[in-house]
Image (cartoon, coloured by chain):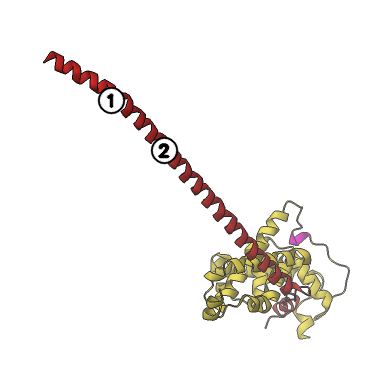
Chain colours: A red, B yellow
Amino acid sequence: MDWLEDELRRALARENPPDGFAERVLARSTRGALGARRWLAAAAMVVVAAGAGGAWRQHQGYLAKREVMLALRLASAPVHRIQSEIRGMTQ
Amino acid sequence: MLIGAVETGCDFRGLVRQHQAMVFSIALHFLRDRATAEEIAQEVFFSLHRNLDQIDSPAHAAAWLRKVTAQRSIDEGRRRSRRPQVALQDVAEPAIGVKPGDPLLCELLRKLVAALPEAPRMVMVLRYQEDLDPAEIAAALEMPVATVKSHLQRSLAMLRGKLARRGIGESEWTG
């Protein structure tokens, strides 16, 4: 075995991290996982709220459309009656 | 995650305890800064925790940790490279009389390795800390095997020259 390589192995031997390292990693990972779950829950709530808002707006549009159609039908009834009277007179 | 851990043998707690010295030491020997090395080691394990579902065996976990630690350490080294770096040839000769097996020789070698450019430095750390062969180092660092061998040969030659100038050579070990 080469002397320099032997010395390099000795110089670059593994060292343990400071005390409590593993505990700090595990605590941070747990906190991170909980944080990620909270963010997911918040994001899900935003999506649901946005969806509900969209559905409510769609429903309001449907009601407005129905009222417009009813108004048009009511307004067109006298016109139809006059048209048929004119048709009867000309015949 | 529990089922995955049972199936793959990759229990996160166990992986941290088993590999903490490896991860910490790669960063430490590359950067020569204990606080930054611990920070990087924590980030690496945190990243492993997020990607644990992609790990399919303990051997895969070890290789993954080695690779990610090397990458993070190199990134950190680059981030610091705005600071002036000292080339290996320019490292000041410590006024100490080192002998074979002397702890001061270990410290001198660590300093000389730390003064290498980033690629050969990481190659040396993986070779002599982790005892990886050139093919394993090439896989970890995503570089050709020939490049790894070249870095090793050139770095060793530079270190020998540097030590020889201090009167440290093979004769101290053989005779």
Residue B121 can be seen, yes or no: no
Residue A33: which disc? none
Give yes or no for contact between labels 1 and 2 (Cβ–Cβ under 8 Å). no
Q: Using the rendered view, name the quadrant where residue B116 is placed.
A: bottom right
The chain carrying label 1 is: A
Residue toward you, B89 or B64:
B64
In the rendered view, does A19 fall on the left or right side of A29? right
In the rendered view, does B130 fall on the left or right side of B106? left
Q: Could you tell me which secondary element the residue under label 1 belongs to?
A: helix
First along the sequence among labels 1 and 2: 2
Q: Which residue is mark 1?
A: A77
Distance from the alpha carbon under mark 1 to that under mark 2? 22 Å
Q: Which residues are magenta?
A: B86-90
Name the spot of residue B131 as percent of width and height, x first.
64, 78
Residue type (three-letter) at the residue carrying disc 1? Ala
Residue A2, placed above or below residue B26: below
Q: Which residue is mark 2?
A: A63
For the point 62% across and 63% down, the residue is B71
Asked if the stretch drawn in magenta spans residue B89, the answer is: yes
In the rendered view, does B19 fall on the left or right side of B7? right
